[in-house]
Amino acid sequence: MLETAKNTLLILSALFPIVNPLGGSPIFLTLTRDYSPPERRALSRRVAMNSFFLLLASCLIGTHILTFFGISLPVVQVGGGLIVISTGWAMLNRSDDDDGNPDGKARRKVEPRDEFKNAFYPLTLPLTVGPGSISVAITLGANIPRHYGWNPLGFIEILIGCVIIAVSIYLCYGFSDKLARALGATAMGVIMRLSSFLLVCIGVQILWNGAKALLSALPALSH
């Protein structure tokens, strides 16, 4: 039992800072500025579920999927980094008038069929569970079984870790409007702009990590 708790804590400590649902809540609120609070919570529930299954699949079968398609992790990082940079840049250059009121007093009606159209892309992938999170999840899935074996306890450790992260995503995203009201419009605007800039920086870092790995492999290919 103690070993199971230690392994679960390892999974959480590795994934939670990268997923960072608290830091992503202002970005989520910006991208869902036209949603009512119930619609935003419904969308955040869907994003949390998508994130759970994506992390779980990355831990359990991520290495096999990449091998099957002949895709390397650096390539995933380069592609995901470009998407993150593009999204962050668009948010950074959005005018204040486009942001609307964080407390939701002025918004258009979102049709039910449109409510979940952005649930997977870009809200789940790559903004919540990005290339960095997937890389770490794949690494955890590859390393933990090597030391502890594929057994029911190993699966439970991964399952519990992914569930806790998914719940935290729902709470931070679903109630991001309440956080905005608590901070005020000015403070939330500053946080949103700062988060947008950091998102661009994160995208550049992810892109560089992948490009650096690809460039380092060039001398080996030339021989």
Image: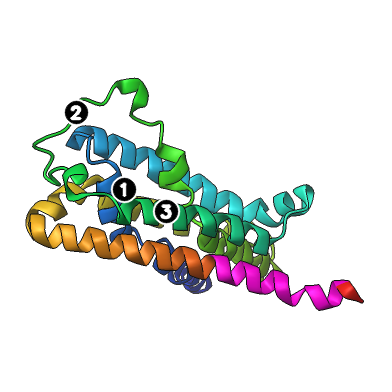
Which residues fall within the magenta stretch?
207-221
Q: Which residue is mark 1?
A: 170
**Residue 28 screen position, x and y as percent:** 30, 49
Q: In front: 204, or 26?
A: 204
- Residue at 25% across / 61% down in the picture? 193
Q: Which residue is mark 3?
A: 128
**Residue 34 screen position, x and y as percent:** 22, 35
Q: Which residue is mark 2?
A: 108
Mark 1 crowd level (few <14, some 14–19, many ≥20, 10 Å Cα): many
- Residue at 22% across / 41% down in the picture? 33
Mark 2 crowd level (few <14, some 14–19, many ≥20, 10 Å Cα): few
Residue 104 among magenta residues: no
Q: Amino acid at mark 2?
A: Arg
Q: Is residue 152 visible?
A: no
- Residue at 71% across / 49% down in the picture? 65
Residue 210 among magenta residues: yes
User: Which dot, 1 or 3, sits closer to the camera?
Assistant: 3
Report the Cα–Cα distance between label 3 and label 2.
25 Å
Q: Amino acid at mark 3?
A: Thr
| Secondary structure beneath label 2 | loop
Which residue ends up furthest to the right in the rendered image? 223
Task: Give the quarter of the image for residue 141.
Answer: bottom right
- Residue at 56% across / 61% down in the picture? 137
Q: In front: 100, or 122?
A: 100
Report the Cα–Cα distance between label 1 and label 2.
23 Å
In this picture, residue 174 sits left or right of residue 149: left
Q: In front: 151, or 220?
A: 220
Q: Is residue 48 visible?
A: yes
Q: Amino acid at mark 1?
A: Tyr
